[in-house]
């Protein structure tokens, strides 16, 4: 079951659920300190914004603790209010598409709130559950593997292939090739060393480098590979070694495990509730018709 996380859906929900709670009488005078905007005579307060943010998923709520991002949210909210007022004036509320989408959103909201209040309440994940899950899935919880490698960065594939040929023929050492041909000023004085390279993570300071990292981890130690393309150019790589990431401790993954177990318990409760409701409402499904 997916949560309704779209801001567009949240806005619609807010307008239908909260609009009458926050309508101002539009009187002039001193502006209260909690009023952040006046749109068509309706005063928008910081309390209103905070109430809306509380409706969002927790990860988005944390996002808007940042003042700049919250200001962006407020700006978007005011712009949405303007479009809402104009759309209402044009009679969008009677539009067939609006009515269909409103019904769909209403169904999803009722479903989600019902699950939250009546099905997935009182979830209980014990310490023993967490420890047991950790012990059974230790191999899933580890820091990423990491590699040590050096590179020669060139502007074109043609240049890179020429340098690679010189290396393959033993006409120049990798270290000398770095000094003579590499255009990467950050690594020339370090014999081309790239520092710690984490698997499945882009190289810091190098655009579009995920594919480059993938290629590095497909190499064998003491092997020269490439040229590999990134947003910076073409890389010839010498891989020194790849090391396995260390296992994560229970404390490092406790929160993640609790979320996994909460989700598993919620899914089970929803499945049980669906089974109960099928009997209550005497559901018949005609598979031959779809």
Image (cartoon, rainbow, N blue to C red):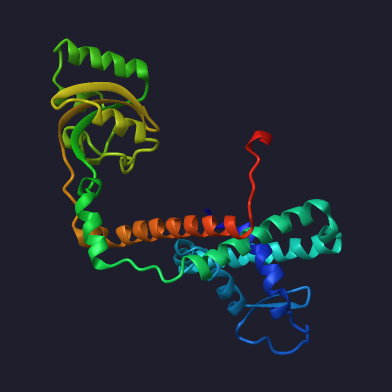
Position of 196 relative to 168 (above/below):
below
Q: Is residue 17 left or right of residue 239?
A: right
How many marks on residues?
Answer: 0
Q: Which of the 4 image quarters holds residue 221?
A: top left
Q: Horizontal and vertical percent for residue 176? A: 15, 24
Position of 3 relative to 52 (above/below):
above
Q: Horizontal and vertical percent for residue 34? A: 60, 83
Q: Is residue 143 left or right of residue 37?
A: left
Foreground pick, 143 / 227: 143
Foreground pick, 275 / 218: 275
Q: Residue at coordinates 17% horizontally, 23% vertically from top-left?
A: 223
From this viewpoint, which residue is outermost toward the top?
169
Q: Horizontal and vertical percent for residue 18? A: 68, 74
Q: Residue at coordinates 82% horizontally, 58% vertically from top-left?
A: 92
Position of 254 relative to 150 (above/below):
below
- On the rendered image, what quadrant is the C terminus found in? top right
Q: Is residue 116 left or right of residue 204?
A: right
Q: Residue at coordinates 35% horizontally, 56% vertically from top-left?
A: 260
Q: Which of the 4 image quarters holds residue 10?
A: bottom right
Q: Residue at coordinates 22% horizontally, 58% vertically from top-left?
A: 132
Q: Which of the 4 image quarters holds residue 127?
A: bottom left
Foreground pick, 45 / 247: 247
Position of 264 relative to 174 (above/below):
below
Foreground pick, 31 / 24: 24
Q: Horizontal and vertical percent for residue 191? A: 16, 32
From this viewpoint, which residue is outermost toward the bottom?
29
Q: Mark yes or no: residue 6 visible.
A: no
Q: Mark yes or no: residue 212 visible.
A: yes
């Amino acid at each position: 079951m997916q949560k309704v996380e779209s801001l567009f859906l949240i806005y619609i929900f807010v307008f239908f659920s909260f609009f009458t709670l926050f309508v101002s009488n539009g009187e002039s005078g001193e502006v209260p300190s909690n009023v952040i905007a006046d749109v068509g005579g309706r005063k928008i307060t910081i309390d209103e914004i905070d109430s809306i943010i509380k409706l969002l998923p927790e990860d988005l709520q944390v996002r808007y603790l940042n003042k700049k991002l919250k200001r962006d949210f407020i700006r978007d909210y005011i712009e949405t209010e303007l479009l809402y007022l104009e759309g209402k004036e044009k009679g969008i509320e009677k539009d067939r598409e609006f009515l269909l989408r409103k019904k769909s959103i209403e169904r999803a909201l009722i479903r989600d709130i019902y699950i939250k209040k009546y099905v997935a309440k009182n979830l209980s994940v014990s310490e023993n559950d967490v420890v047991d899950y950790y012990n059974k899935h230790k191999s899933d919880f580890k820091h990423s593997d990491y590699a040590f490698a050096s590179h020669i960065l060139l502007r074109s594939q043609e240049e890179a292939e020429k340098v690679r040929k010189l290396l393959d023929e033993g006409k120049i050492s990798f270290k000398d090739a770095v000094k003579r041909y590499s255009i990467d000023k950050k690594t020339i004085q370090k014999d081309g060393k790239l520092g710690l390279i984490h698997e499945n993570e882009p190289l810091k300071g190098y655009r579009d480098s995920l594919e480059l990292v993938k290629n590095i981890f497909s190499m064998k130690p003491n092997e020269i590979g490439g040229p590999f393309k990134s947003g910076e150019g073409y890389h010839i790589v010498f891989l020194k070694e790849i090391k396995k990431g260390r296992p994560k401790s229970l404390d490092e993954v406790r929160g993640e495990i609790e979320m996994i177990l909460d989700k598993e318990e919620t899914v089970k409760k929803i499945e049980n509730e669906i089974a109960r409701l099928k009997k209550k409402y005497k559901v018949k499904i005609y598979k031959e018709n779809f």
